[in-house]
Each structure stands twice: as structure tokens, then as C-alpha cells.
Image: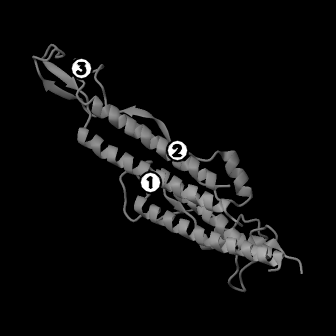
Amino acid sequence: MAISFENALGIHQKALEVRVQRAEVLANNLANADTPGFKARDIDFKAVLGSVQAGQQVGGQLTMTTTNGKHLPTSGNGEMSESNELLYRTPNQPSVDGNTVDTQEEVAEFTKNTMQYQASFQFLNGRFKSLNNAIRGE
Amino acid sequence: MSLTNIFDIAGSGMAAQSIRLNTTASNIANADSASSSEGDVYRARKPVFSAIQQDVMAQAMVGQTGELSASTGVQVQGIIESDAPLNMRFEPDHPMSNDQGYVMYPNVNVVEEMADMLSASRSFQTNVSIMDSAKTMMQRLLTLGQ
């Protein structure tokens, strides 16, 4: 049986990718913390990872998840899927200039995301170590 | 690699905040620059921030690969002069006083400027820590497989 990188690395490489994307979105929110009218954005990590995974399974195409037998299957070019879209954050309190960035909340989310990134990294690194061991036959 | 984008985003935030800090410094320094005519007097300057939107081409391209697209940082659209009413004081002995004995003082609200300064400096700090986190994440990534 050949060793496949796709199988060996599993979900972690995709998770790491989505974590980086989320870090970018949150960094953008914080950079625009004082921009009038700017709306804070975020991604639904679970949904995005789900769509990335689904894309992995059907050969690079994004499909909609069907949770009911009556759901219509989509051909899957990702156009109809809402899951990999950027969403808008619901503001906790209104502001005069229409900005919905709550700096504290964004910093907390960013820190959490960094931690989760490190966890994903740790898992991915572990997979590489296992592969290394397998190749050396120790 | 989108981790490098975080450097650009946080960098744009830092640049914008330092421009804001610059205008604050200028406003406070000129808070008492008197003048005899309404046209010559210093007026409080404020930067106008706006989000940098990704250009349409790039957006269409990332749209095809199903990647996420957002605005990429902040920019200063320009500096505007405040149109708040000027501060007129009756000081007939002042060398700059006009015919009626009034001296024009800038419309700078020093307390407001101090609050603005604190806000700018805090936002700058946030951007610095974001950049630092991105750097740590990148350094980690470089140790992958070691």
C-alpha cells in the first residue's frame, strides 16, 4: 500500500488553511476598527471547513451538503453554496458612525483563532513525524 | 500564502493610525495659533478613513476558486479641515486683533484631540500585536516537519 499524503495529513492541512483565512479576516476587522461605516466580518469556520472537505471528496468541486433525502443534489460549482461566504457580525451595540467592529471581541477571536491554528499545526506536525517514522522504519 | 496579507493589513492600519496621530499632534500644537482674519486661521484637521476594497479583477478570480474575499486593510482618503465655528475672543491689546478688537483662535478642541490621540494609540497597539501574532504563526509554519 502506497503512502498517500492526502490521506496521511487528513483534515489538518485544510483546517490550517481555513485558520489562516480567518486570521486575515479578523486582522482586517481590527485594521478598520476606526473606519466609519465599516461592517465587521467573519467566517463560519465549521461551514467553510465542511465545504473545503466536501470539495476534497468530489475532486476539487464544492457541493452543498444535503441533510435530508428530499434535498436536491447540486452540480457543485460552489455558486449556490452560502457556507464559504463571508458573513457579517451582529453588533452588540450601535455606534454613531455605523462601524460594527468591537475591538475587544475581535482581539479575543483573533487570539482564539491563533491558539486553534497552533493546535492544528501541532496535529499536522505530528502527522509528518509519523510519516517520517514510517519511512525510516524505526 | 495569506499570512503575508496580514502584514499588509496590519501595516495599513498602523500607517493610518500614525497619520491620525500626526493630525492630532498638529492640531494640539496649533491650538493657540491666533490670527486676525478668518481665512488665515488654522482649522482642526481630521483624517478620513476608508476600507481598501479588493479590486474587481482579483475578486472575480478568487471567486472562481471559491476563496474568501474581503477588503484588505484601511487607507486614508484625505485630510479634511473641520468646519466647526472658530473661536473668537475679544482681546483689543493683542497684536493680531482686528478692527473690532477680536482675535481668531483655531476651532481645535484640545480635550477631543486628547481622546482622539488615546484612541489612535490604542488602535496602533492592536495592529502591532496582530502583526506580532502573524509573525509567530509564520515562524511556526517554517518549523513544519522538523
Q: Are marks 2 and 1 on the same chain?
A: yes
Work out how far the residue at label 2 is from the one at label 3, CA to CA, in angstroms: 36 Å
The nearer-to-camera label among 2 and 1 is 1
> Residue tagged by mark 2?
B12
Residue drawn 47% across the image and 51% down it: B128
Horizontal arrangement in the rendering, residue A39 relative to residue B70 (left or right) = left
Residue holding disc 1: B126
**Residue on which disc 3 sits:** B35
Query: Could you say which is closer to the camera, residue B81 or residue A32?
Result: A32
Query: In this rendering, do the residues under marks 2 and 3 share a single chain?
Result: yes
Q: Earlier in the sequence, mark 2 or mark 1?
A: 2
**Chain bearing mark 1:** B
Name the spot of residue A87 as percent of width and height, x first: 56, 63
- Picture disc at residue B22: none
> Which class describes the residues within 10 Å of circle 2: few (<14), some (14-19), or many (20+)?
many
**How far from the left and from the top, in percent, is residue B85?**
25, 32
Neighbours of disc 1 within 10 Å: few (<14), some (14-19), many (20+): many
Q: Tell me which corner region of the image, top left, top right, bottom left or bottom right, holds residue B28.
A: top left
